[in-house]
Amino acid sequence: MPDAPAPWKEIAVTVPLRRNTQFQLLWLGSAVSQLGTELTKLAMPLLVLALTGSPGLAGVVTGARLAALVITQMPAGVWVDRWDRRRTLIMSQGVQTLAAAVLAALVMTDSAAIWHFVALGIVDGVCTAFVGPVRTTAIRAVVPEEQLHSAYAQEESRGHAARLIGPPLGGLLYGFGRAIPFVVDAITFAVALVCAIAARLPRRPGTTPQPTAEPLHPTAEPLHPTPETPEPAPTPKSATAATTKRSMRREAGEALAWLWRQPGLREVCAAVLALNLLGGAGMLPLIVLVGERGGSAFTTGTVFAGIGIGGLIGALLSGRAAKLLPPGKLLIVFPALLGLAYAAMALPFGPWWPFVPMLLVSLVTPTLNVVMNVVLTRVVPDHMLGRMDALLGLAGTGLTPLGPVIGGALAATLGGAGTLVLVGALLLAMSATTAASREVRHFTGTTADDA
């Protein structure tokens, strides 16, 4: 009869994702706050238009937030790798909560001016630049590697559900009262802040040396917990300022240099950026196409709802679907499917027809997002995960706005149907080019450092 295990022996047990309190609190806070953000995406321009009558000023408000996000994104990634990550998340979401509460109060008292929207939009954009990299590092810290697919599938469902529900709900609430969407937005930020505090995420400052071996399951509690690692002694301000000035550019360059040294991963990331560019180029021609066929604004909205419906269903299935194809092959298949979908939208079946191919291709989109998130979370060294998240986010943010510009220019010349066929052909050509790359074909989600 074998000996029973000693009662003092520590046994690591994988906690099911649904019982992973840290991840679920992080997810709940993000889900609630994203819903609030989606509420105001429609309410904000409606209110600015009502106050000023100027579509241009409504664009300035949105552009100010986006500009602040883009400008801050890379420095934020560097600082996230240096700073106490738990404190950074709490402070960022705390400032967002305060800014949203101030805006709600201004709207409720009819005191809001255009500069208030611009200033508070900039504050929110800066905070968002920090929240993104912190959440990426937090997911890696609290979710075991074998559960990353399920975790990111749950993340995808959050985003698609918020984008599907948020805008129409925001319009409905705005109809009841101008201030209501902004009050709800402030409440959602407060909920996210409470969840961030309650989650007690690992601090893992970037200056802490990497351990030689990670715990088997970061969410498992040891029988004999050890006290939390004390924070390092504060650095004199002058030394900190000198270090920041000297190494900010170097640390950002280290992330780019590391990516360049990873054959396969660098080609995959470049293909994703090209895919975002071409994918965005098809949205405006689609609006033109529906209008050319006599569709109303409601018809256009319904067609675009196919993205949200398909994406939400696809997100629920993406955890399993992501395991069917390795990342490289998935990045060959998906552009081909998207290209065929865009070309199929041009078929002369009436203004409602594009809903069908939009919904079908959106079923696959979450799988690609899940796979890429898992790959980057798994292979990027922890001490530069914030920088890498910011670097890829910055590249995507910089290229994505070019898509509608290109699509709009082409639609003005070729019309909606002609442009969709052209963009579809370019996506098929991209798929063929990607398939010709040996590095992409054989990429399975590992890097040169893992070999």
Image (cartoon, rainbow, N blue to C red):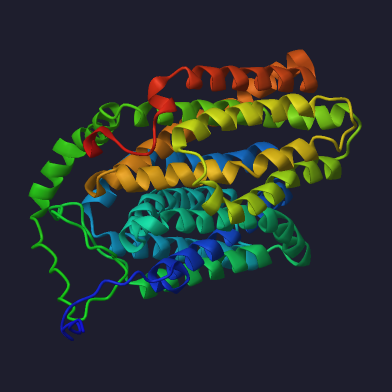
Q: Quadrant of the C terminus?
A: top left
**Above/below status of 17 relative to 368:** below
Residue farthest toward the top in the current orientation of the protein: 413
Whether residue 158 sits left or right of residue 123 in the image: it is right
Residue farthest toward the front in the current orientation of the protein: 1
Residue 92 lies in what quarter of the image? bottom left
**Above/below status of 262 relative to 41:** above
Looking at the picture, how far across and down is residue 321, in whole percent?
Answer: 55, 48
Between residue 196 and residue 432, name the one nearer to us: 432
Looking at the picture, how far across and down is residue 5, in whole percent?
Answer: 19, 82
Residue at 59% over, 49% down: 114
**Above/below status of 260 relative to 185:** above
**Above/below status of 181 relative to 128:** below
Looking at the picture, how far across and down is residue 418, in whole percent?
Answer: 76, 17
On the question of residue 45 being in view, the answer is yes
Whether residue 397 sits left or right of residue 146 in the image: it is right
Residue at 41% over, 55% down: 148
Residue 159 lies in what quarter of the image? bottom right
Whether residue 184 sits left or right of residue 241 in the image: it is right
Looking at the picture, how far across and down is residue 375, in whole percent?
Answer: 39, 43
Residue at 36% over, 41% down: 390
On the question of residue 77 being in view, the answer is no
Between residue 408 and residue 164, name the one nearer to us: 164
Residue at 54% over, 39% down: 63
In the rendered picture of this protein, how many numbered marks are placed on residues? 0
Q: Quadrant of the N terminus?
A: bottom left
